[in-house]
Image (cartoon, rainbow, N blue to C red):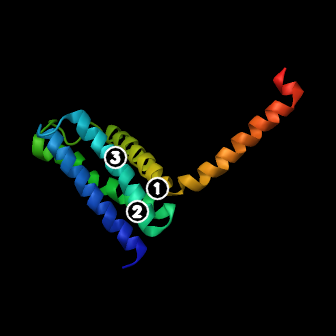
Amino acid sequence: MSRRHGAVLLGALFGALVVFMWLAARSEMADTTFALVVIAVLFIAAGLVGALRSGAVAGGVLAGFVAGLVSALTVPGDYALFHTAPYFPFFDVAALVDTMAMAAMAVMILATAGALLPGLSKHRNRVGRSIRAFVAAWRHDPKLVA
């Protein structure tokens, strides 16, 4: 199985877990705040595991993207299972597009943050050296101190 297929399957698994947590929160089996935190952690984990399995940030972002696609089933599911609004899913198309765009942005930010986590240690050393060099230069330049 190629790395791309692995990332897609991982994303589908994490997306299914997100749908399960949404269902638990909507049917009052779990606290809503707890469910939202777990859902955010699941998107971060999708990016992290996808990046670790593929060896690239793109694999993590792909896994998070697929998790977001699968979790988008919650929008029609909210109406079909809980009948929250008389008009499916919103009163107008602009509200639907705006809501889906904001949800996609949140998912991709979380998944990208998770995908960037494996490479954090090598960047941490570089940033640490840069900060130490800046502080050393600051101490030796009399114009900057006074």
Q: The residue under label 3 is which amino acid type?
A: Val
Q: Residues within 10 Å of mark 1 (few under 14, many from 20)?
A: many
Q: The residue under label 1 is which amino acid type?
A: Ala
The residue tagged with tag 2: helix, strand or loop? helix
Whole-number angstrom distance, CA of label 2 to CA of label 3: 14 Å
Using the image, determine if residue 57 lies above or below residue 43.
below
Q: Residue at x 44, y 52 (%)?
A: 114
Q: Looking at the image, is mark 3 or mark 1 earlier in the sequence?
A: 3
Q: Quadrant of the N terminus?
A: bottom left
Whole-number angstrom distance, CA of label 1 to CA of label 2: 7 Å
Expressed as whole percent of the image width and height from the top left, the position of residue 27 reads 11, 40
Expressed as whole percent of the image width and height from the top left, the position of residue 91 reads 25, 36
The residue tagged with tag 3: helix, strand or loop? helix
Residue indicated by mark 2: 50
Q: Looking at the image, is mark 2 or mark 3 earlier in the sequence?
A: 3
Q: Residue at x 30, y 39 (%)?
A: 37
Q: Residue at x 44, y 60 (%)?
A: 60
Mark identifier at residue 41: 3
Q: Residue at x 65, y 46 (%)?
A: 127
Mark identifier at residue 11: none
Q: Indicate the quadrant where residue 132 lies.
A: top right
Residue 29 visible, this angle: yes
Mark identifier at residue 115: 1
Q: Residues within 10 Å of mark 2 (few under 14, many from 20)?
A: many
Using the image, determine if residue 97 lies above or below residue 14.
above
